[in-house]
Amino acid sequence: MPNLKENDNALREVLIQAKTIAVVGHSDKRDRTSYQIAQFLRQTGYTVYAVNPLIKEIDGQASYAALQELPEPVDIINVFRRSEYLPEIVDEAISINAKTVWTQLGIWHQLSAQKAIDAGLNVVMDACIKIEYLRLRVGSLRND
C-alpha cells in the first residue's frame, strides 16, 4: 500500500476508524505545533497519549517515554520528530501493532515508510493530521 496521503478516501477512513492516537514528540510548551495539534485531537474526541521521554506529564496527563509503555493499543502514531528518528519509531510502531504511522509536514523517510507498509501498517507521511481532518470534514463522519 502506498503513502495514503494521495488517497482521500483512505485518509478519511483512517481518521474515522481511529479512537486512540499516540503523539510522538508531544511538547509541553503551548506554543509548539505538537502541543496544539494534540489538543485539537483531544477536543475532537480522540484519546491522545503523549510520547516524549524528556517529559513526565503534560497538563496533568502522563507522558510516556516509549510507545511500548502506552496503557492500551493505539490506532495512529502521529510523529513530530525529525526524519532521522523514523526508523526506530516505525520499529516501535510495528512492535506494538499500531495500525497507522502518520508523520507531520516535512517529515518523510522512504525506507521507514516501506518497512511499515511491508509490516501491514497504513502510512501517511508529510501531512498534517489536523489539516487533513478539517479538509476531509471528518468531524461530521465520526461516531464517538
Image: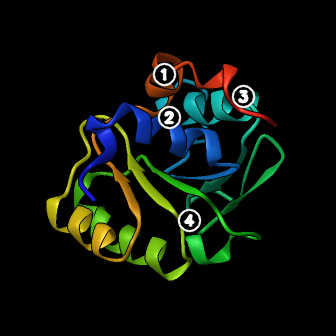
- Please identify the quadrant where the N terminus is shown: bottom left
Which residue bears the numbered disc 2?
Answer: 12
Report crowding for label 4: few under 14, some 14 to 19, many 20 or more residues within 10 A (C-alpha): few
Residue on which the image places disc 4: 53
Q: Is residue 14 left or right of residue 110?
A: right
Of the residues under marks 1 and 4, which one precedes in the sequence? 4
89 or 132, nearer to the observer: 132
Say whether residue 42 is left or right of residue 12: right
* Kind of residue sitting beneath label 1: Leu
Mark 3 or 1, nearer chain start: 3
Report how far apart the C-alphas of labels 4 and 3 lie in the structure: 26 Å
Q: Residue at point 70% right, 49% down?
A: 19
Type of amino acid under label 2: Arg
Label 1, on which residue?
Answer: 136
Q: Which mark is residue 44?
A: 3
Looking at marks 2 and 3 on the same chain, the residue that comes earlier in the sequence is marked by 2
Query: Where is residue 107, by image quadrant?
Result: top left
Q: Give the secondary structure at mark 1.
A: loop
| Secondary structure category for the residue under label 4 | loop
Q: Quadrant of residue 109?
A: bottom left
State yes or no: discs 1 and 2 in contact (Cβ < 8 Å). Answer: yes
**Crowding near pointer 3: few (<14 within 10 Å), some, many (20+)?**
some
